Amino acid sequence: MTRRRVAVFISGGGSNMVSLLDDMAREGHAGMPCVVLANSEDAGGLARAAEQGVPTAVVDHRPFAGDRTAFEAAISAALQPYAPDMICLAGFMRKLTGGFTDQWAGRMLNIHPSLLPKYKGLNTHARALEAGDSLHGCTVHEVTAELDDGPLLGQARVPVLAQDTAETLAARVLVQEHLLYPAVLRRFAAGNREMLILQS
Ligand code: GRF
């Protein structure tokens, strides 16, 4: 089996990235990590990737302020030596333009902490609480030029509890993210794009 080479993009602690790396290290996975790329050298996940023996790369977005195309060209150049077949965004907090997402159409995934199409963008947990939702969760989807849009590949549903704060809800959703994203990537790398539903 030729395994698909997976680049994982992070901005922070990288707990979702670790869950993907851990699963790709298990038997029978059709994907293998080829590089973890961050947009800041301060991203805590870089050390965690290195501990697992995965190459890391940093493309700091700050010198490219106002020029997303140049930032994306630098990302493409940084990826080139690792020859990825696909990309997983895992808490990558930079918007990508159509110029980049089109190159990776059907080959780039993202995890978002809401039941899309609800609550695209930030502060999803607070928004779900404000709306009085009884169900919240997370979604893995293919990335297109529209933010937090694109074909859905999987969702994990999390009941909202009466005493929930944005923090307690976020923590329970994150537990599900760590189950959902590896499960979707495992299927996707093997060619299965059917929607996966996890219910907690
Ligand atoms: C996750 O909740 C992810 O869904 C969101 O940012 C968080 C990243 O966490 N976009 P981590 O860096 O994977 O720990």
Image (spheres, rainbow, N blue to C red):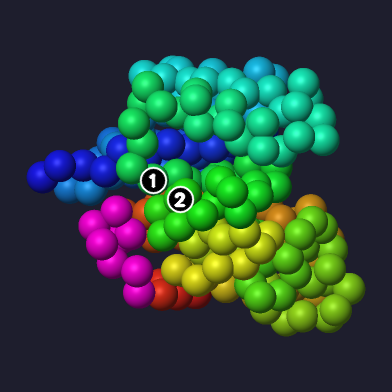
Dot 1: within a 10 Å radius of its alpha carbon, few (fewer than 14), some, or many (20 or more) residues?
many
Q: Nearer the viewer, residue 187 or 158?
A: 187
Q: Is residue 191 left or right of residue 107?
A: left
Q: Which residues are magenta?
A: 187-194
Looking at numbered disc 1 in the image, what kind of residue is underneath it? Answer: Met
Secondary structure under tag 2 reads helix
Distance between the Cα atoms at labels 1 and 2? Answer: 7 Å
Q: Residue at coordinates 68% horizontally, 60% vertically from top-left?
A: 147
Looking at numbered disc 2 in the image, what kind of residue is underneath it? Answer: Trp
Secondary structure under tag 1 reads strand
Q: Quadrant of the N terminus?
A: top left
Q: Which residue is mark 1?
A: 86
Q: Main secondary structure of the magenta part?
A: loop
Is 188 included in the stretch rendered in magenta?
yes
Q: Which residue is mark 2?
A: 104
Question: If you read the primary sequence from the N terminus, does the residue marked by circle 1 or circle 2 appear first?
Answer: 1
The percent coordinates of residue 69 (x first, y second) are: 67, 38
The part of the image, by quadrant, that contains residue 125 is bottom right
Q: Residue furthest left?
A: 1
Dot 2: within a 10 Å radius of its alpha carbon, few (fewer than 14), some, or many (20 or more) residues?
some
The part of the image, by quadrant, that contains residue 192 is bottom left
Q: Nearer the viewer, residue 20 or 171?
A: 20
Check mark 1 vs ligand 1: CB closer than 8 Å? yes or no: no
Is 199 included in the stretch rendered in magenta?
no
**1 and 2 marks in contact (CB < 8 Å):** yes
Q: Residue at coordinates 62% horizontally, 67% vertically from top-left?
A: 149
* Residue 37: mark in rendering: none
Residue 22 visible in image: no
